[in-house]
Image (spheres, helix red, strand yellow):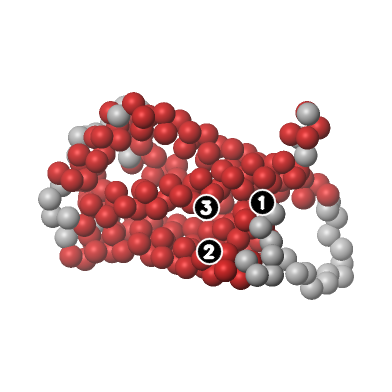
Amino acid sequence: MRRFFGSSVTKKLVMALAGLFLITFLIVHLTINLFLLSDDPDPFNKAAHFMASNPLIKIFEVVLMGGFLIHIICGVILQIQNWMARPKRYKVTYPSQTSFFSKYMIYLGIIILIFLFLHFMNFFFIKLGWVEGDHENFYGIAHDLFHMPQYLVIYLFSFLILAFHLNHAFQSAFQTLGLNHAKYTPVIKGIGLVYSIVVPVGYSIIPIVIYFFK
């Protein structure tokens, strides 16, 4: 049993399931964030208050944090194992079938992780009381941040990186789960491509509209 859970195949499987869970969460989170486009702060603040006070949401947050940690830890371990398996770089390199983004997924993930920490500092940690801020007015906090050019650039760049990460991760997760078939794989790739464009664009439109029109 220990050997099974310690295998690379198991880590890839766990990382894939955690990744699909996070992909689903991104849609839910985007739906709530769209309230930021309203001129009335109440809908977003009420949604934020509900998420901060509802016991079921608190349980979900623990599951979500677990999903983040599992996905990150498995990804780092697998990358280190890959590096250890190829400790020397050969002088002559040959074309690889591995995609560009597959090779650099770990670096894309690190950029996303840095942005997540910044995002938590400005929102989640305020809710927990770890960072000073008005936890009853996250609408105002978000609008203030999105009116800062430097934060806007960081935000948009992070979601551009996330788009590339999602495009590879979506199809990779289903492939890891064994859904690799000549009939279904092109469909999965197509859905993954649409998702990796629509969701990051949806997140990106919000700060752009706020910065220029709110």
* Residue in the picture at 83% in, 53% down: 86
Q: Quadrant of the N terminus?
A: top right
Q: Earlier in the sequence, mark 3 or mark 2?
A: 3
Label 1 element class: loop
Residues at circles 1 and 2 in contact by the CB criterion of under 8 Å: no
- State the image coordinates of residue 144 (x, y, percent, origin top left): 22, 50
- State the image coordinates of residue 133 (x, y, percent, origin top left): 25, 34
Question: Real-space Cα distance between discs 1 and 3?
Answer: 26 Å
- 206 to 84, vertically: above or below: below
Label 3 element class: helix
Say left or right for 72 vs 144.
Answer: right
Q: Which mark is residue 177?
A: 1
Question: Real-space Cα distance between discs 1 and 2?
Answer: 15 Å
Label 2 element class: helix
Q: Nearer the viewer, mark 3 or mark 2?
A: 2
- State the image coordinates of residue 57 (x, y, percent, origin top left): 36, 33
Residue 114 visible in the displayed image: no
Q: Which mark is residue 30?
A: none
| Disc 2: CA contacts within 10 A as few (<14), some (14-19) or many (>=20) | some
| Disc 1: CA contacts within 10 A as few (<14), some (14-19) or many (>=20) | some
Look at mark 3 in the image and give the residue it sits on.
111
Q: Earlier in the sequence, mark 1 or mark 2?
A: 1
Look at mark 2 in the image and give the residue it sits on.
192
- State the image coordinates of residue 189 (x, y, percent, origin top left): 58, 67
Q: Nearer the viewer, mark 1 or mark 3?
A: 1
Q: Quadrant of the C terminus?
A: bottom left
Residues at circles 3 and 2 in contact by the CB criterion of under 8 Å: no
Residue type at the position of mark 2: Gly
